[in-house]
Amino acid sequence: MNFLSLFVLIPILMMAGLAIARDMKQIRTVAVAFSTLQLGLAIYTVLKYLAERAAGNAEEMLFQASTMWYEPLNIHYAVGVDGISVTMLLLTAIIVFAGVFASWKIEPLSKEFFLWLTLLSIGVYGFFISIDLFTMFMFYEVALIPMYLLIGVWGSGKKNYSAMKLTLMLMGGSALLMLGILGIYYHSAPEGAPLTMNILEIAGNNAIPHDWQYFLFPLTFVGFGILGAMFPFHTWSPDGHASAPTAVSMLHAGVLMKLGGYGCFRVAIYLMPFAAQELSWIFLILTGISVVYGAFSACVQTDLKYINAYSSVSHCGLVLFAILMLNNTAMTGAVMQMLSHGLMTALFFALIGMIYGRTHTRDIREMGGLMQIMPFLSVCYVIAGLASLGLPGLSGFVAEMTIFVGSFQHTDMFHRVFTIVACCSIVITAVYILRVVGKLLYGAVQNEHHRELTDATWWERLSAVTLIVCVAAIGCFPGWISNLISNSLNAIVERLS
Amino acid sequence: MEYTVFILLLPLAMFLLLGLLDSKLKPRVAGILGTLGMTVCTALAYFTAYQFFTQPRNAEGVIPSVTPYNYEWLRFTEHLHIDLGIYLDPISVMMLVVITTVSLMVHIYSLGYMHGEKGFQRYYAFLSLFSMSMLGLVVATNIFQMYIFWELVGVSSYLLIGFYYTKPAAIAASKKAFIVTRFADLGFLIGILILSFFTKTFDFATLTATPTAIITETAGATFLGCSVASWALALIFMGGAGKSAMFPLHIWLPDAMEGPTPVSALIHAATMVVAGVYLVARLFPVYCVTPEVLELITTVGAITALYAAIVACVQTDIKRVLAFSTISQIAFMIVALGVANDTDLHEGLGYMASMFHLFTHAMFKALLFLGAGAIIHAVHSNEMSEMGGLRKYMPITHITFLIACLAIAGIPPFSGFFSKDEILTAVMHKSTFWGIWMTVVAGLTAFYMFRLYFRIFWWKNTDCSHHTPHEAPLTMTLPLIFLALVTCVAGFIPFGELVSVNGQPYHIHLDWSVATTSIIVAVCAISLAAWLYLKENKKPTAMADATRTLHTAAYRRFYIDEIYLFVTHKIIFKCICAPIAWFDRHIIDGTMDMFANVTQWVSARIKGLQSGYIQSYVWILLMGTLLIAAITICCLL
Amino acid sequence: MDFSQYSLIWEYMQPELLLLVATILLFFVDLFASPRFLDKWFSGIACVLLAAVTAISCIPGGETHTLFGGMFISTPMTTAMKLVLNIGTILVLLQAHSWVNSEACKVRRGEFYELMFFTLFGMYLMISSGHFLIFFIGLETASLPIAALVAFNKQGGDSYESGAKYLFNAVFSSAIFLMGISFMYAMSGSLYFEDIALNAANNTALFVVALAFIISGIGFKLSLVPFHLWTADVYQGGPTAVTAYLSVISKGAAAFAFLWVLFKTFSPSPELWQGILYVLIILTITLGNLFAIRQKDLKRFLAFSSISQAGYIMLGVMANSAQGLTALVYYILVYIFSNLAAFGVIASIENKTGKVSMDDYNGLYQTNPKLSLAMMLAMFSLAGIPPFAGFFSKFFIFASAVNSGYYILVLIALLNTIISLFYYLLVVKAMFINPNDNPIETVKTNCYGRTGLVICVAGILVLGIASCVYGYLSGLSLTVGI
Amino acid sequence: MEIPMIYYIVLSLVMFFAGVYGFITRKNMLMMLISIELMLNAVDINFAVFNRFLFPGQMEGMVFAIFAIAIAAAETAIAIAIIINIFRHIRNIDADNLDDMKY
């Protein structure tokens, strides 16, 4: 039994534990215990992975295991990780951990909330560990559907509309995806050879005909791109995030949107390099648009969550943008951006949730001078803001710089010009971040009732500090993680060239 | 000289310590700690300078530059990687001295000035952060490290300007400062990208060692008619212009005066704002291969110098006056760099001069600001109208301020005279037009500085009825005195021996023709100022009325800020952001909703199919069958 | 005629014969046992009998048998299909218990079960027919009793209307079906599937007309658009148990038989019927969904959902391959479990409170968490959400269609799944999200109903994860040799 | 003299579509039932005729016709039962009254 399967097993046990938990106390105990365990497992995985690599294990994927599942279609339950997936696993574990604390006082039906949250995390973990298209896709959808109830039941605002829209749009994505995957499967092997769902084998066979790649690449890329909030399929994100409860926004923006980026190059680009080369320019334009577009529309929003959602559109657009540059550095940047954006947007949503929980409004025009009332939260918010506008020493900077430098190494003029366009986003980001910080935290207290509000409680502090520490750690010592990623990207990049 | 790394680590440690313990510490303790840290830092810097400048020169008489420490921080490609390290050469060491000195003075000064302020600890934390970033910037071994610390100084300046975060003006100012510089930094970043794409390196040593590499690499590559190399360097200069508040990116600096005065002294007079000059100086050999960019630099500098000088003449807020004088003085340095050239020592005079002026200016401008701080501290106002005749109440401030004014006006034997003279010589040598231009600016400088001086210390003999201004405490006067002394002697430092364009010693010899002219001009300007402002009278207002339009325009800074406001709010926000947001909500999102609505609509329209009558069901069934048959037959035939 | 066949008949027609025996037994029990005994045990006996029949006879063997000169064919796959149908029927019986034994119906309890068994018998014949006569007899034996069952609630509500609608539509379509067969006969001179495949000139207009008529005849039972119009009304009016039966068992049997007929009879000209089906599938799925999204009555809602599901099932037929056959049977199996879970919940709530409107379900989770969860699982499974069985069945049926190259068709079907997800989520929304001050009071289901639900839920959860089922079916379908 | 097959076919088709017409136009359920019978009998004629003329060899068609008739009888029986049931409820047997459930 491969230890990666624990990533799926532990949450299942966690669900069982939650099911038998009776009161809030026990629920919290179970949640904290298991999410900590999960975090430990993730860290262990990273260390083990690094050790293996250090030991000179040059396999593309480590800790592989594969058991036949559906014999007639040659579907396996196959797991394995490379640098990218371990990074993502770590990210997920961290955010789930922080999310548990962020939803410490969730009401009502707290048990169900954690059950659904755990189901969601099962999907995410499973997606990141599996290297079989079918299981990957299955976990992908497992991760999607709990969103509906999580938003619908525990959400706020026009939650029904948002939840339905989010679910349907993402399902639309996975509909395209299913066709794409089936198409890949039926062209996965040369004539006579057995068809396979295993990503590595498909890549090894490299048998997908070029004309089919033209058809399948857009399907898969858009399918995943919808979850990656690619223009013009991003509109689920603002409403969805605005209505979602704190922990869900954290997990969704922090991790779930990364499924999109991860899938885009693990499936779309990795398996169909030819089409990736040929068609990248189309999606480059789209993603380039969403980078700038998202930033611009964030400038005029007044709802904190909308601002953050649009900035997520912009940042995740940057991820896809970098992936499409198809060179090692840019892709490394993309993965680092996933990581950093995951952490800092989770931090953002956590803080917004905490502030909202106190002021009961997310409209920046109705708030002000929070720095005097809740200094801790405000300082954290400033840090998150600085991270997202790319302050050196925080994770955002290294990710963005890697992307920009990497993208600018592209030999094609068109790509370089687009890189410069994308660069402009850092200025716009500064504009809307500082706008929020100025309106929300500085200045005089807008609403006198806010004066008697309290600062963060210990669990909120814990949740925020965890994320800040990670953001700063990556920002200050990016070397090891960037090596970790770029080493495992070599194989993919080789296929592209 | 590995210990130099502590020059960076110490302030960083201070920042973390003070920042994390924030209110856990007593204000006093925090202040003392910060100051001590900076003292040690300064000592180290001085020791480094001593060690560096006293080391044996090599064959062609150049002081060899040292890289005591360099560690790969982040690797992009096999060529491109960000290193964090320390690169010691004459100018960086000179900057180390300047920064630590001024920073230390400000630390001490703030003990008195900021006494009892809310968030005293935070203030010192930010000061340490700034010092760390600034020091990191000057010792950068590669352009990307410089960019990193460049951003960090930007942020710490943002935090310090917005120190009084309940004051709307301060918030606005800090936001403006950050965004404008950020915009400039975008140029810097793109410049770096282009440069590194062609030269395949970030490293200063490599870049400056083979400056022509970029030309050979980018051979033929042009964009909009200019060679890519020029683009890259111009964009990089844009970054510098932003930080150094060159026209038209200067708008943030006057507003930045909303911050605490010591901060203005440290960041917006002595150190951060000269980062641009330093950047150009750092890449000077590379700039020399693209003369057109140097032309650009000269022009920008000259225009800024004149513009700022004119505006400074009519401002009534003393800190604003100083701010504009800063802009104009930095413009001097920029111009000096622009006219210089690295072919030989004499051609490179401007380079040396600008560095020299940077050094002296840092001292006396810091002195001016700290003096102004003392005055504001006493009068509780920035407005000239509130002041006048302060000389008898605060003698020390008065004397030191006068020295500084003389220095900046270019009166021998004060430091300003020597450095400015070198600059004028260099400019004159390059082109007479710019030479005269800059001399005029020098005259204006003398005028507005003494206007300021007389308005503050003479003008009217108020024996202030409501409250008597009193001399500042020792913690504040001590730095004033120290800086004043430096200002007096700095001119006699054999600067050219240490810093010159190609590192060989250069013996400063005054070009008396230039010197005398400038002195005469200055004296005239000063006496004019004295004639106008020594005693309270109506002449100034009369003159103002005489040149009403010009005066107002100058007072409103020639409406540059208004233009910016118009562009940002009216055009970018109203005409780009808002429409995009609308488009997103109504068009893109609307399309998505439309799918749903259309489905609903269709399903509502076709419900009649399910009429509930057996016969219609049967009818449809039959027709369906026959239709299928018919269509299929048609397809077959 | 030779009597040597009788032993063979007994051996090969075991399921049918045993089912008849069971029916007769049931008849006698109903006749002679005391009412109190019946109240207590009758449904139990019925279930046990059916279970026994299943256990004894419906375990697929290895080889294929034919009887009556090929009129009756029993392959492992048909036996497996019978097994599937039996499982479904048992579940229906379990759910029906509380309704059948209610005061209103208990007097006619016997008829219910006997008719039920007869229809099942009819479907057996339909499935394993090799000749249109048997097929027709099976078809009618399957559909006529259902008419009676639909009209079972003599006094209650709309039952009679549904009965009438069902019967008249059924008769009419069977007339058309017969017409089709007669043309086939005219062309081929035989009613054996094989002979027709051999002799019928498959590009004449007459052939096409016959084909269209036959498709419409069976499409009626499958409620494919445009032969579907009866479905909603009948489902809504009929007793819930019967509706459930109608929606899964008879649909499943019809689907299988349809595939059988098309494969056997029209194998020489697949492109003909595939072309027709292509259009029908798109129409069926789309219209079914479009109607479903605005339904408030849950039974009617499920009727339309079952129409679109029929469209998905047909994808397996389109594939025209062993894989398609496997996927189809598997899909039917999963569909039985999912849909019966839904109907089980509806039935148990309807029996207690008589409420079937979606609005009545608002806030159901507060009072009946277990039922709501079961319902939600059913909905997710029908919508094809992993890790529930429905996801796998959908995936495999799509895979089979894609394997035969129907990318566009599958894409359309997939896009339709979004609509279907929408309305399935509406139910979930009602139960979990919509606020309600006085939701349906807590409903206590009896042990039969509960067992039924538990089995359904277990099926939903296990069938997908446990790959053996699909593997087994695909093993069988390979023996058929399509 | 032999009547050619075509006559029978025409007859059966006429019967069939007459039945269809009646089924769709008549509101009275009994009339509809009768129309159904027409259609079924048309089919029976078809079988008989095809057998008799085209494949005189074996009796397949005839047998089928007999079964069809039997089943038609069964259908009628159930139909009548249901119609009676309907009459009990709404006191008439007009097909148009059966439209409580629609849309």
Image (spheres, coloured by chain):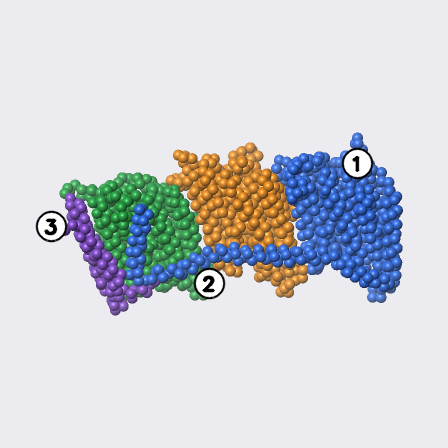
Q: Which residue is mark 3?
A: D1
Location of residue B88 in the rendering, given as x and y in whole percent from the top left corner = 75, 38
Q: Amino acid at mark 3?
A: Met
The answer to whether the residues at label 2 and label 1 have Cβ atoms under 8 Å apart is: no
The image quadrant of residue B54 is: top right
Residue name at image x 75 percent, y 57 percent: B557
Q: Which residue is mark 1?
A: B344
User: From mark 3 to mark 2, how far is it between C-alphas?
Assistant: 82 Å
User: From mark 1 to mark 3, how far is it between C-alphas?
Assistant: 132 Å
Q: Quadrant of the C terminus of chain C?
A: top left
Give chain A's shade: orange
Q: Which of the chains bears the disc numbered 3?
A: D
The image quadrant of residue B541 is: bottom right
Location of residue A304 in the rendering, given as x and y in whole percent from the top left corner = 59, 57
The reply to whether residue B232 is visible in this rendering is no
Q: Which mark is residue B462?
A: none
Q: Secondary structure at mark 2?
A: loop
The correct choice, above or below, for B635 with respect to C95 in the image is above
Q: Which residue is mark 2?
A: C435
Q: Quadrant of the N terminus of chain C?
A: top left
Q: Which chain is blue?
A: B
Q: Which chain is purple?
A: D
Foreground: C237 or B635?
A: B635
Would you say B592 lies left or right of B216 here? left
Q: Which chain is green?
A: C
Q: Amino acid at mark 2?
A: Pro
Foreground: A288 or A25?
A: A288
